[in-house]
Amino acid sequence: MKKLVVFGGTFNPIHNGHLAIIRALAARDDVGTVLVIPTRVPPHKVEPGLPDGAVRLALCRLAVADLEKVEVSDIELRRPKKSYTFDTLTELHNAAPDRPLVLCCGGDMLTTLPTWYRYDGILRLAEIFAVQRVGVDPAAFCAGVARIRRDGGRVEEIPLSVPDISSTALRQDPSRMQSDVPPAVAAYLAAYRLYSEKGSEA
């Protein structure tokens, strides 16, 4: 059975850097589905003024609408409290126990993964795809990969040329939205005047 790759994040907003990773993952022969999961309340970072989950869910669906093998899930948005990756992986595993699960981690997430809730359970439930991103120290990235392997995790380094885009930078400079997010997302943001002011969250 082909792998289900979990690609989660706040997507505040989703941008072309995210899409580059999603497309590369979906193009793999061993991947059956890339599941894009907007988080409700991320437990490992603070994002004041995070737009409503329904908005971010809609933006994700617009962004991947024309991509094969890619789906968007509200599995974490349905939870009333903080959403933990371990809980999501457990739910997905219980739904299809024979389906191999993969958690896609950017370099910044990779270095903090050992501090996440039920880290040991995450490694037991899923393989890790580690994607380096601009701005993350290569030495720290390599150390993160080594730590996961030392802890018994299965990890594959994914060499990708990912555009140097971050959601934070886009919020700080909304003029980049037109060029750095998918056209359908840009149109939605403009129509509803989201992120229209420098430094705004919504």
Image: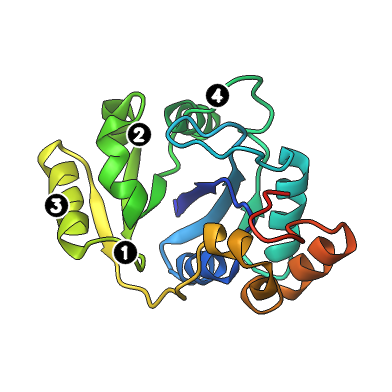
The image quadrant of residue 79 is top right
The image quadrant of residue 48 is top right
Q: Name the residue under label 3.
A: 143
Query: In the image, what residue occupies the spot 54% across and 57% down?
Result: 168
As measured in the structure, the alpha-carbon distance from the residue carrying label 3 to the one carrying label 4 is 28 Å
Task: Name the spot of residue 71 as percent of width and height, x first.
Answer: 65, 54
Q: Earlier in the sequence, mark 4 or mark 1?
A: 4
Q: Name the residue under label 4.
A: 82
* Residue 3 visible in image: yes
For mark 1, give the secondary structure: loop
Q: Which of marks 2 and 4 is nearer the N terminus?
A: 4
For mark 2, give the secondary structure: helix
Q: Which of marks 2 and 4 is in front?
A: 4
Q: Mark 1 points at which residue?
A: 132
Question: At label 3, which amino acid type do we have?
Answer: Ala
As measured in the structure, the alpha-carbon distance from the residue carrying label 2 to the one carrying label 4 is 20 Å
Query: In the image, what residue occupies the spot 50% across and 69% down?
Result: 165
**Residue sitting nearer the eye, 169 or 197:** 197
141 horizontally vs 50: left or right = left
Task: Name the spot of residue 91 as percent of width and height, x first.
Answer: 52, 28
- Mark 3–mark 1 contact, CB under 8 Å? no
Q: Which of marks 3 and 2 is nearer the N terminus?
A: 2
Task: Name the spot of residue 150 as percent of width and height, x first.
Answer: 10, 41
The image quadrant of residue 161 is bottom left
For mark 3, give the secondary structure: helix
Q: Mark 2 points at which residue?
A: 125
Query: In the image, what residue occupies the spot 45% across and 33% down?
Result: 85
- Mark 3–mark 2 contact, CB under 8 Å? no
Q: Earlier in the sequence, mark 3 or mark 1?
A: 1
